[in-house]
Image (cartoon, grey):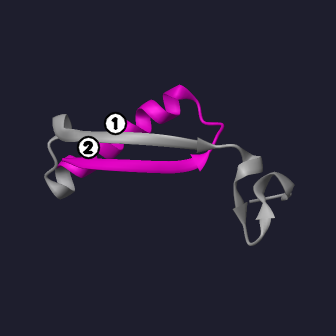
Amino acid sequence: MAHVQITMLEGRTVEQKRRAVKRITEVMKEELNVNPEKMTIAIVEVPRHSYARNGILISDRTSI
């Protein structure tokens, strides 16, 4: 069994996430011989005001 967790800033569309999990599943199957039926993927979306880099909230940055 394999579990993949993706943490990212919120804002992607459902279609983008749909395509991403499909490709991630394909890669895990091809490269690591993971049975897709035994694999789970969790997408954790974080608001910009709850994510920081280098001591600065992402929401306070002008560019990432």
Left or right of 61 on screen, residue 14: left
Left or right of 57 on screen, residue 24: left
Left or right of 53 on screen, residue 38: left
Q: Is residue 26 magenta?
A: yes
Q: Amino acid at mark 2?
A: Glu
Name the residue beneath numbered marker 1: 22
User: How far across and how far down the image is residue 37, in percent?
Assistant: 17, 34
Residue pictured at 64% horizontal, 40% vertical? 10
Instruction: Tell me the quarter of the picture where residue 31 sits.
Output: bottom left
Residue pictured at 28% horizontal, 42% vertical? 25
Local packing at callout 2 (Cα closer than 10 Å; few below 14, some 14-19, many 20+) is some
At mark 1, the secondary structure is helix
Which region shows up in magenta?
A: 1-29
Residue found at the far top of this picture: 14
Residues at marks 1 and 2, CA–CA distance in whole angstroms: 6 Å
User: How far across and how far down the image is residue 55, in percent?
Assistant: 77, 70
At mark 2, the secondary structure is helix
**Considering the image in quadrants, where does the C terminus appear?**
bottom right
Residue found at the far front of this picture: 50
User: How far across and how far down the image is residue 8, in percent?
Assistant: 58, 49
User: How far across and how far down the image is residue 26, in percent?
Assistant: 26, 43
- Tally the marks: 2
Q: Which mark is residue 26?
A: 2
Residue pictured at 81% horizontal, 51% vertical? 59
In this rendering, the answer to whether 62 lies above or below 26 is: below
Q: Mark 1 near mark 2, Cβ–Cβ under 8 Å?
A: yes
Q: Amino acid at mark 1?
A: Lys
Residue pictured at 80% horizontal, 58% vertical? 63
Q: Is residue 51 magenta?
A: no
In this rendering, the answer to whether 10 lies above or below 55 is: above
Q: Nearer the viewer, residue 57 or 11?
A: 57
